[in-house]
Each structure stands twice: as C-alpha cells, then as structure tokens.
Image (cartoon, coloured by chain):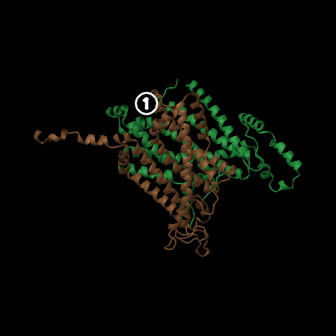
Amino acid sequence: MAKYILRRALQIIPTLIGILTALYILAYLMPSDPLRAVLGEQYRRLDPAVVEGIREELGLNKPFLVRYTEYLGQVLRGDLGRSFVLEENVSDIIAYRFPRTLQLMFGGLLVGVCIGIPAGIIAAQKQYTWVDHALMVISLIGVSVPIFWTALLAQLFLTQSKYGIALFPVAGYEDGSLIHLVLPSLVLGTNLSATLARVTRAAMLEVKGQDYIVTAHSKGIAPRIVLLRHQLRNALVPIITVVGLDIGYLLGGSVVTETIFNWPGLGRAVVPAIERRDTPVILGILIFGSFLFILINLLTDLLYAVINPRIRYS
Amino acid sequence: MATTVEPTSSVPAPVSIQKRTSNRTRFWRAFRRNRIALLGLIIVVLMALGAIFADVLAPYDPVEPHYTNRLEAPSTNFSLGTDELGRDLLSRLLYGARISLVIGLIAQGVAITIGITVGAIAGWYGGWIDDVIMRITDIFFAIPGLMFLIVWVTIFEPGPVSIFLALGLISWPGDARMMRSQVMAIKELDYVIAARSLGASTTHMILRHVLPNAIAPMIVLASLGVAGVILSESILSFLGLGIQIPVPSWGTMVDASRTYITTSWWYGVFPGLTIMLTVLGFNFLGDGLRDALQPTQYNK
C-alpha cells in the first residue's frame, strides 16, 4: 500500500510541471504591459528610465526562459511571488481567501451529497417507476440550469425583495455566520446533487444483480442493511470518483457564486486580478486550483482501496 | 390442454424478421420509444428554427430602443416583457439563439475533433505515444475550466474565433479519453486483425473499421458536450467576458438584468429559462441517444 501511494504521488509530478508550464506560457502571453496596469495614470508621466528601473526590479525585462526557470524554482520552494498591484504576497492572498472558498465548496459538497445520494438510491430502488422517471428528469434539469441563474432566482425569491420572503441575507460574508453560507451553498450544490443522483442510481443498479447481494438477501439480512452495507458500499467507488472530479467544478463555480454573493474567496479575487493584469495573482490562484484538483483526485484514488478491499494494488 | 397448442407457433417467423431489421431501424425504434429523448429533439429543433427564422418570427427589432416601453411586464404587446431600453425580450432571445447555438455547435465541433483525433492516436499506437498524450490530457483536465476561459479571453480578446477555440480547448479531454478506450477495445477485434493481415493501411483501418464502430458513444458525448459548451458560454457572457456585439447572447442578458431583478422579475427569469431549456434539450437528446445506441441496456 505504501509503495502504491508513493508511486501514485510520483506519477503526478510530471503532470504538475506540465500544468505549471502551460499556465506560465498563458500568463506570459497576457497582453498589455503589466506595468501600465500597476502604475495606472502615472505611467505616461513617468521618466522612461524610471519605468525601466521598475521593470528591472520586477524582473520583467529578463528573457522568457530565465523568468520561467526562476518562477519554477520559486514555486517548487512554495513561493508564489508577490502581487504587482496589492502590497501582498500571493501565498498570503491565497491563505486568507482559500479558507472562505473552502467553506463554500464544503457547503456545496454537503448539499450535493445530502440530496444527490439519497435521490439516486431511491431512484434505483424504484427503477422504471414514475418516482425513478421523475427523479431523473429533475436531475437532468439540475444539470442544465446555469449556476448564475439559480443564484439570481434564489436572491429573487428567498431574500428580502419585492417577490421574495426574507429567509436569508441577499449576499455578503460574516465570520462564522452560517446563515450567509446557506444560499451560496445551495446554488453551488445544485448541479453536483443532480450529477450525484444520476451516478448513484447507475452504480446502485450495477451492483444490484451481483451474487453477493442475492446471497445477503437469501441469508435473511434485513433489506435496509443489505442496501446500505452491501449495495451502497460497493457502489461508492464511482460516486467518489465523481465527487473528486467535481471539485474542479466547485472551484470554477465559486467564481460565479462568489461574484454574485459578494463572497471574499479565491474566485472573486480572480476577476479583478485579470482586470488589473496582476499576473502573479492570476497565475498563483490557477496553479493552486489545479494542484488542489490533482491532489484531491490522488486522495480519491487512495480512498478506493479503503472502501473497496477487492481493489488490490501491486 | 394439448389441443390448444397451435401447430404454427413453432414457425420462427418473427425472429427472422427481427434479424433482418437494420441497425438504423432498431436505433429509431429505441429512440422513439424514449419519450424524453424525443422531447429533447423537439426542444433542440424548435430552438434551431427560432434561431434560423429569428428575423421572421421576432415581433420587434432586437436592438432599437423604445424608451416609452421601458421595463414593461409581459403583456399581449410584449409577450415576455421588455428590458431597460424598452426592447422586446422575446425578439432579443430569438436573435440571441443564433449566437448561443452557433457557439455551442462550433465549439463542440472543435472539441470533438480534437478529442477523436487525439484519442484515436493514443488508443491505436499505445506505448509512449499514448503515455505522452494522456499526460497532456490530464493537464487540460486538471486546469479549472472556467478560470482558464477567463484568462484566455483577456489574452485573445473575446472574438468568435477565440471563444470557439477556448471552449473547444477546455472540453476535449473527456472526449479523448472515451475515444481512446473505444479504439483500444476495437483494435483487438477480429475484423480489424483480419483487415490488418490482408495488408490494409493504417489510415484505411482507422477510417473504415475503427472510427465507424467507435462513433456511437462519441455522438452521445457530442450532444451532451453542446449542452456543456452553451452553459460555459453563458457563464462567460454573464461575467461580461463573452463576444461583444450589439445583439447579446443569453448570458449577457441575465447579467444586464441583475440591476433590475428586484423590480422586474421577467427580465432575468426568461433569458435564464431559455438557456436552461436549450441545455436541457441537448441533455435529453444525448441521454436518449445513449440509450438508443446501446442495445445491451435494452436487453437487460
């Protein structure tokens, strides 16, 4: 097992370096002088010699390969550089904002799991009945709904407005306030719960006909126990895979959710950083997001072995 | 009673008729039986007709402002209401359909082309080629799609071509993986081995034997992919980063409605509903195609 973990961990290193390179090239291609974005109006009035000095200080006048290798070394030491505009280190920005995004992602995940998995189990139990059909149509609607629209509808009907009831605050963030977390989590979790319902149904049906389920039933074990201990447990592998893959969706969805709900997370830092051409911040957040995604998928891979002992790794 | 047994019942006529039905007939039969898929097809066709005949169907001009009719609720004059410049929402949605559908189809075309090519090469050749290609696929898979899109449009101005490319670039990894697994399974089948031993060229084998047999799941993925791309484009437009043109795409309309959402519900609700219906149509269609193209599921 330890050997397997090590091998999988080593395998992701080329992928990580590839991501770093791809994103760095992308950021390098960003148009317009970042200096102009940093200095704003002052830029035109400045002495060209001074501008050149600042470029030198920021390391902007070095050739691409030199800057790239320097950046690579920096990132490998855990340093994501310093924002051009804000007087802050990128890692500090991430350290402040990521926990807030994590709250949202966790909320969305909770909504997704609590609605999606039970719905999928019920649909599988009632296969080909109207309950199953209704649940699957609803889940397809859930997959098709644009996230910004769900957010607007939620704000329209569930907060203080002309058409709504004031159940939740319209937007905003307060430390430790759960009520502010409800709407963004619901919105972020809608799509996930729909996906999970479909995957859970398929996985449960796949397992249903297996011999060990028939055996368990014929041994006289209570159907509820068979359902949870035998069927669900063996159906968990694809479910967990989807959860792992959807972390990327949750991260992307947080850009929209945080923008609409005024939530001070990573997603809401990306859009302004792009407007300011603040390359280190954009790059840092994108790299962080991709690494997180890869790490979580590595963890889900390892979880398989815990959940399903039939999977033996050499 | 033995006398009730009809002697003719032993004639296996129905079986032989069934054997003669072509794949296409069987596909249509399965597809039609699936009411959801049919509904999806109807939605998609209606949206496409709306987009094609927008200039005939739209009751008003989609761009010209009418300041006297600002933010009017749905009525007999304006069936879906008007926006803050007094423009008819229905007309704007019809014209917007052109943008959303064209982007959806072309971008998904880009994605599926990359996916099929890359996946087929990886699956057919295997070995280090496969390794390299799949690692690159992993990289594209891991980069958060929406953030990538946002960065992309700031680099390459959000024109039509850059949007097609960007949406295509974030959508192909799933297609490539599916194609690869298809090709890997098919290339070991007897008819491919037979073709190979007859001296068929690689191109011939891939184009005539592998592709046609791998295409079914790709069609399903393409249909579901159009849904995904339309959704992504609407998010991009909503963030104000979509194609900049006078006739807005649906996402732009929802974005514009945000200021008025608390007073004019129709402004935000109808464009969002249109996006949802269109995406739903393609999802229904893809789902139905999957069931119809996988006869094994029906035999269960």
Where residue B161 sits in the image (x, y, percent)? 62, 51
Q: In the rendered image, is residue A179 in sight?
A: no
Q: Quadrant of residue A170?
A: bottom right
Under circle 1, the secondary element is loop
Where residue A20 sits in the image (x, y, percent)? 68, 38
**Can you say whether A175 is above or below B55 in the image?**
above
Q: State the brown chain.
A: B
Q: Residue furthest bottom?
A: B68
- Dot 1 alpha-carbon crowd within 10 angstroms: few under 14, some 14 to 19, many 20 or more: few
Quadrant containing the N terminus of chain B is top left
Instruction: State left or right for residue B222 relative to residue A224.
Output: right
Q: Residue A78 or B176: which is nearer the viewer?
A: B176
Q: Quadrant of residue A65?
A: top right
Chain at tag 1: B
Quadrant containing the C terminus of chain B is top left
Where residue B6 sits in the image (x, y, percent)? 14, 42
Specify the colour of chain A.
Answer: green
Q: In the rendered image, is residue B111 in sight?
A: yes
Disc 1: which residue? B189
Where residue A52 sits in the image (x, y, percent)? 86, 46
Q: Residue B198 or A199: which is nearer the viewer?
A: B198
What kind of residue is marked 1? Answer: Leu
**Can you say whether A306 is above or below A195 in the image?**
above
The mark tally for this picture is 1
**Can you say whether A284 is above or below B157 in the image?**
above
